[in-house]
Image (cartoon, rainbow, N blue to C red):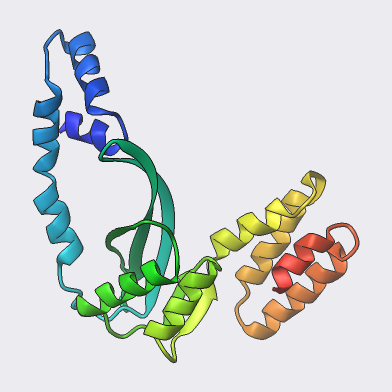
C-alpha cells in the first residue's frame, strides 16, 4: 500500500524502486510497482461511476492542474474535482475527471457526467469565477443559483491588497461572508468600501465584481 501511495503522490516508479532498495535493502522492479498501481484502477472507476442517489442542494467544483506523463511526453492536465453537500449536511466527494484543460467544454462534459449518474435536487453551484465553468454550470443547471467560492474570492482579494492591509482586509471580508442576511452583508460591504476605497482600490474593485 505504501508503494502505491508514493506513486499517487507523484513519485516515479523508478524513484520508488530506488527508495525501497535504500530503506528496505530489497529490490522492487518498476514493472512490479506499475502492476500494483494498476490494481487501483477498478476501485477508482467504481468510485467515479457510482450512482448519486441522495438530494444534493449544494454542488462544489474546482480544478487542479497536474503534470503527467503521456506516452513519451510530460504534459499538463486539468483534474476536475466534483463534490457536494447533501440535504442532511454531509459532504461527499463525487469523483474526478481528467481533461486537457479547464474550459467550457471540459466542465460541460463533467456536469453531464454527474447528471448521468443521477444528480438531482441542485439549488446552488459553488466555484471560482472561471468563465467556462460558470457558463457550463448555467447551461447544465438552468434556474440554479451560482455563487463564487469564498476561499477563491479571499485569495483574489488578498492578492490585490498591499501587504500592510491584508490582515484587516481578511477580517472585514469575513464579516461580509459570515453575515446572517443580505442586509447585514450590504452594511459590512459599504463599510469595507469606505475603509479601502483609497488605500486598496484594486481590492475594492475585486470585491465589487
Residue 154's quadrant in the figure? bottom right
Q: Taking 17 as reference, is 63 above or below it?
A: below
Q: Position of residue 153 (x, y in %)?
A: 61, 63
User: Is 51 positioned to the left or the right of 205 in the image?
Assistant: left
Q: What residue lies at 19% left-to-right and 30% top-to-bottom?
A: 2
Q: Depth check: 49 or 195 in front?
A: 49
User: Is 8 positioned to the left or the right of 140 in the image?
Assistant: left
Q: Position of residue 205 (x, y in %)?
A: 77, 68
Q: Taking 31 as reference, is 182 above or below it?
A: below
Furthest residue in direction bottom, as rendered: 143
Q: Taking 138 as reference, is 10 above or below it?
A: above
Q: Depth check: 80 or 148 in front?
A: 80
Q: Position of residue 188 (x, y in %)?
A: 74, 73
Q: Depth check: 43 or 101 in front?
A: 101
Q: Name the quadrant of the C terminus.
A: bottom right
What is the tally of numbered marks visible in this picture? Answer: 0
Q: Depth check: 156 or 169 in front?
A: 156
Q: What residue lies at 50% left-to-right and 79% top-to-bottom?
A: 146
User: Is 32 positioned to the left or the right of 201 in the image?
Assistant: left
Q: Name the quadrant of the N terminus.
A: top left
Q: What residue lies at 32% left-to-right and 72% top-to-bottom?
A: 109
Q: Position of residue 30 (x, y in %)?
A: 15, 24
Q: Taking 127 as reference, is 64 above or below it?
A: above
Furthest residue in direction front, as rendered: 72
Residue 14's quadrant in the figure? top left
Amino acid at each position: 500500500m505504501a508503494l502505491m501511495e508514493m506513486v499517487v503522490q507523484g513519485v516515479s516508479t523508478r524513484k520508488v524502486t530506488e527508495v525501497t532498495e535504500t530503506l528496505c535493502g530489497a529490490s522492487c522492479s518498476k514493472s512490479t510497482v506499475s502492476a500494483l498501481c494498476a490494481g487501483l484502477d477498478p476501485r477508482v472507476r467504481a468510485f467515479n461511476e457510482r450512482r448519486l442517489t441522495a438530494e444534493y442542494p449544494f454542488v462544489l467544483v474546482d480544478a487542479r492542474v497536474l503534470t503527467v506523463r503521456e506516452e513519451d511526453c510530460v504534459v499538463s492536465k486539468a483534474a476536475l474535482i466534483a463534490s457536494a453537500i447533501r440535504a442532511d449536511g454531509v459532504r461527499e466527494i463525487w469523483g474526478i475527471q481528467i481533461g486537457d484543460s479547464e474550459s467550457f467544454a471540459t466542465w460541460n462534459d463533467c456536469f453531464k457526467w454527474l447528471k448521468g449518474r443521477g444528480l438531482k435536487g441542485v439549488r446552488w453551484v459553488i466555484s471560482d469565477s472561471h468563465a467556462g465553468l460558470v457558463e457550463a454550470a448555467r447551461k447544465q443547471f438552468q434556474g440554479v443559483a451560482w455563487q463564487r467560492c469564498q476561499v477563491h474570492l479571499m485569495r483574489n482579494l488578498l492578492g490585490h491588497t498591499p501587504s500592510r492591509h491584508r490582515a484587516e482586509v481578511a477580517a472585514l471580508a469575513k464579516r461580509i461572508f459570515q453575515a446572517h442576511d443580505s442586509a447585514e452583508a450590504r452594511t459590512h460591504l459599504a463599510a469595507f468600501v469606505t475603509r479601502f476605497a483609497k488605500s486598496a482600490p484594486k481590492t475594492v474593485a475585486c470585491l465589487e465584481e
